[in-house]
Each structure stands twice: as structure tokens, then as C-alpha cells.
Amino acid sequence: MNKIIIVLLLLMGPLNAQTPLTNTFTYQGELKFNNALVNGSYDFRFSVFNVETGGSALEALVIENVTVTNGVFTTPITLTNDLFTGNKIWLGIEVKTNGTADPFELLSPRQEVTSSPYAIHAQFVGADAVTGVQIQNGSIDVNDIDTGSVQSRIIGSCVTGQYVKSVNVDGTLNCSGNIIGSTNTLPFQAIVNNKRVIRIDDRVDLGLTHAPSITLGGDSNSVSDYGSTISGGYLHTITNINSTIGGGIFNNVSGEIGTIGGGTTNEASGNISTISGGSNNTAGGYFSSVGGGINNQATGNRTTVGGGEKNLAIGSYSTSPGGLGNQAGGRYSFATGKYAIVRDSAASVDLDGDEGTFIWSDATATDANRFTSTGPNQFLIRATGGVGIGTNNPNGQQLYVLGSSYLRNDSDTSIAADLVLGGGSTNATDDGVLTSDLSIAGSDLFIKSNDAVLVTIDTNNDGDSGRFEVRSASAGTLLEVQEDGTVNIPGSLNVTGTISKSGGTFKIDHPLDPKNKYLYHSFIESPDMMNVYNGNITTDKHGEAWVELPEYFEALNRDFRYQLTVIGSFARAMVAEEISDNQFLIKTDEPDVKVSWQVTGIRQDAYAQKNRVQVEVDKPISEKGSYLYPEAWEVTEELE
């Protein structure tokens, strides 16, 4: 469309002189369409160029919804300061009806920005903008400079061997020889980002010896006595002499000559105590130390905790090298592993606690199930996997010794024999297995307790027979193994595992001739782990009878088998209902019939499930070709 634009450029300055100028000026123009003044809402795009025609826009600004009344419109335009460089600039103007998708239409020619809005440049001074042209020589003198905010240039220099100590306001220097620091009683401090990072205090000890303290790291670190140093970290405190904190956070040394290497929340309160690191550890005893870990305490004098968690060294000279929850409570005691406890003075009711006791506990211990000493000078080990000497596979034994062992009590002359296990005796007749002292008649081996012989091994048959015998001081013989292999047990025999035998009988005094004869009966054998139940019962007037079995019957057994025998009659009998709820029903075709019954079952208890009898088994290689009882087969032991 044809547009005729009459433009008035007006710089709208503030009426109040105290209102600061901005880089916004007002553009006013007149918009016509076909020489007719228009009314309505329009969108304008103003583009800035540094040439009157052509070129690329330096900046573009779109202003929407501008009201045009009788052709007249007014709008503020804000341009960036960088456009006002002292060179001419022009505005390119485009217009379209507001709220439509019509493209902008370019109006021509471009409008030159006149000097009135260009005066905005007066309040902005760009880089390298002030030269001798703008500020005449001598126009600013010393009275125009605030020396509190503008420093004079440095005047002079230090002689060789001296260094700048400070610079005065007038630019002159204060020089000192070979030092950096203060010459008064105030501490020397180094500041970074307005925070203290180094502080050195001049201090003297009680002997008037120069012993400064040094504080490095965060400005929250505090050293309050002589000869002490904090090397780094923050929120540390040293309140005693000649002490050191290396770093970390929240560490505190309150004892003399104490040391904390690092970590957090550690407390070295004992004199000459040391904590290497870790968290929440305490070295409270004289010459005490904690290597690291968490929540450990070395509270006794000359005590040590190596690390771990919640370990205590209470008795003087005690040690806990690590682990969890251990306590070395007695003097010269040692506790390690997990919840191994050497009792302290309070628990043992002894001033020295259980002194000299060594204790080690395995991983099965808990806080509620601690392994605790019962007296002084004990050597205690809890190892549920076994203790091995000379072997790394103790097979779960409390003590498994591989190799020679020699047990001897040289100090007690009342003991007539030495016990040698696995050899090692100086006796030339020692066979290296198990021997007794030749001073005992017959070279038998006796094991005594309270001077009563409890075990006898007679190897040369100088007694009743060659035998191994276990006796009780009050009850006599409990177990006898005779030379031919016969074992006699006068009491009961309880076997948890399985008995393997070639045959089995009971042996009793013969009921018809008990003085002169024995009666033997063989055991019932079966390839199954079978239980047998039987009894007699009489059916009722309806020919029925319920057999009640033990209440554990079905829990113990499976695979039931039945046998019924009618007594005194040719009646027929049957199992009418099989076992259920530990009972079964017998039914006869006549009433009042006596029936003998038998039921078998196969064991299904937990032991039987895991230990089924293997009926047929190959002999091991070492036993193949030999017989358990070759005389029964009428062959020699070795086959040809």
C-alpha cells in the first residue's frame, strides 16, 4: 500500500533534573494510506543501520499494538549504548496491521537519527573514549582526587637486601630487612578474599623461650597456647601447648603435646596423645594413641587402638588393634576381632581389671553375645571354624594340631609321667605317637584328675588283659576295649549317627536257666528304615473296629503296609479305611471277631531324610580285594 510518512523526532528528556537520563527516546510520526489518515492498531519494526541505504541492520526492535489516531502515533524506542559511537545512524521502519499474519511493509526512505537523541551518549563513556581532546591538560588537580579511594603511584624503592613491608597513602614505601611480617606485638596475618588464611602469634613458654603458634586454614581455626600449629582445615581448636592439628574438620587438642593428623570430630585430651585420623575418636590417656576408624577410645595411659569401630583401650598398656566393639579393659590386655571383651576394673572388681589377658573373637559374636574374659592372665580364643596349628584347615575342630606337639609340666615334680603327642620326646623308645614315662611300672599310660585314674591304656598285657579303659572315680569302669576288639559298656549307649554292623543280637540271661545260659535273638533287618506296629483288636456287632496309632505315627512314617489275621474264626477281614488322623478301620464279615493286625512304615523324619541307608555300595579302592570276614568265605585276606 502507498504510505506517506511525516516524521518528527523528539528527544523526550525529563522535566526533573534529578531524574537520570536513559537510552530511550520518543519517536512520533504520521501514517497515511492512499493519502488518507488512518486509525487503528499497528505493529512497527525499527531497524538501525550505519548507512543511509543498503547494508545490514545493526539492531532491530519490534513494537506491537501501537495506537494510531487520525494518522498520528507515538512510541518510545530503546537502543543499546554501543550504537552511539559518534557516527551517523539511520532508522529503517516497517509496519503491518496488528493481530494479522500479514508481512511487514517497508517504508522509505530511512530516517536519520538527529543530534537530540544522540546526546544520550553523553552519560556513557566507552573504552578509550577519554583523550586529550575531551579533557584538557591541568583540568584535574590533587584537590579533585579522594586519596582514600585513589592511591598515588608508588614512590621510591627498597635497597638491596630489604623488602617492602607496607605502602603509605602518599605512595612512599616502608622497607624491612630479610623479614615479612610485623614488628609489633600484634599477630601476623595473611588475608585472602577478606578471610584470614594464616595467623602467626608471638608467644613464649613458661621458661621465657620464644615459642610462636601458627594457625593456617579456615579463619574458624583457633590456637590459644604457645608452640602449637594448625596446618589446615577448619573449625579446629588447640587449647594447650606444643600441639598439632594437620587438617580435617572439628578436631580438638586439649592435652599437652597432643597431635591429630586429620579426620573429623576427634579429641586428643591426654598429654602426649595422638590420633592419626578417622572420625569421633578419643585419645584420653597419657601417651595414648588411636590410628583411625570411628568411635574408638584410648582412655588408659599408654594405650593403643589401631582402628576399626567402637573399640576401647582402658587398662594401661592395653591394645585393641581394630575390629568392632572390642574392649581391652585390663592392664597389659589385648582384645581384637568382634565384641571381644577383657573386663575392666568395674566389671572384674579388681583395680587392674583382667590384666594380662589376651582375647580374640570371631565374626559370630554380637553386641548381645559378647566373648568376655573371666579372670586375669587368660589366653582366650573363640573360633567357631576351629583353631589350626600347623594347618590352615582345622575342620571345625576347637583345636587341630598338625605336626609334632610336646606337652610337659617340668615344674610339678609330683607328676610321674610326661605326655607326648606326635613324638618329640628325648626318650629313645618313644614311637612318636603316644607314650608314657618308663618310670611307671608296665609302661601303662594313666590319665588322672584329682589324683584319681580315669583312663588306663595297658599295651603290654601286664594287667588282666591288654585294654583301653575309661573309669569313673565313683562308678568304676564306664568303657572297656579289650585286646581282641571287644567293647564293653555297662551303661546305656546313645548313638546320634548310623551303626554299621555285620550282625546284631540281644543277649540276656536265659529265662529257663539264668545261672548257666545266655539267650540271643537276632535283630530284624530290612533294606528300608522301617518301623513296625502291631496289636490285637475285636470288631463290634457291626463287624467294625478302629485301630488307634500313636499321635506321632503319620509325622514319623510314610508308605504304609498292612497285615490282618483272623483269630478263632474263618471270618474274612479287610482294611476298610486306610490310615488317616493316625487311625485305620478294620471290617469283618461277622461281628465280634478277634483280629491280629500289623502295620509298617518307612521313616520320614528329618534325620532319615538326610541319611538314607545305601543298600549296595562299592568298596573303596583301598579295600577292594579284601573281606571283612575272610574266614566266613573260606578265603585268605588277599586274593590271588
Image: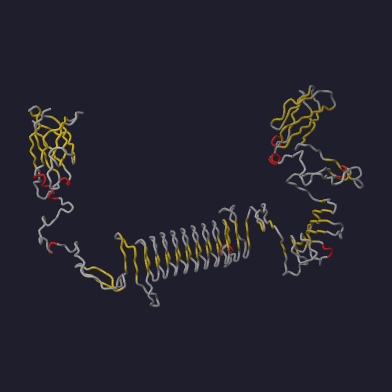
Residue placed most toward the observer, 423 or 600? 423
Say whether residue 421 is left or right of residue 1: right
Describe the colour scheme in one phrase. secondary structure
Q: Position of residue 561 (x, y in %)?
A: 76, 31
Query: What is the quadrant of residue 381 in the picture?
Result: bottom right
Residue placed most toward the observer, 157 or 7? 157
Say whether residue 572 is left or right of residue 612: right
Q: Position of residue 79 (x, y in %)?
A: 16, 43
Say whether residue 611 is left or right of residue 631: left
Say which residue appears at 60% left-offset and 66% top-offset: 356
Q: Which of the image's four quarters has the C terminus?
A: top right
Say whether residue 119 is left or right of residue 304: left
Query: What is the quadrant of residue 511 in the picture?
Result: top right
- Which residue is outermost to the top? 589
Q: Position of residue 413 (x, y in %)?
A: 75, 70
Q: Position of residue 573 (x, y in %)?
A: 79, 25
Task: Judge whether 366 appears above or below 625 on screen.
Answer: below
Q: Which of the image's four quarters has the N terminus?
A: top left
Task: Judge whether 156 appears above or below 633 on screen.
Answer: below
- Which residue is outermost to the front? 54
Query: What is the quadrant of residue 333 in the picture?
Result: bottom right
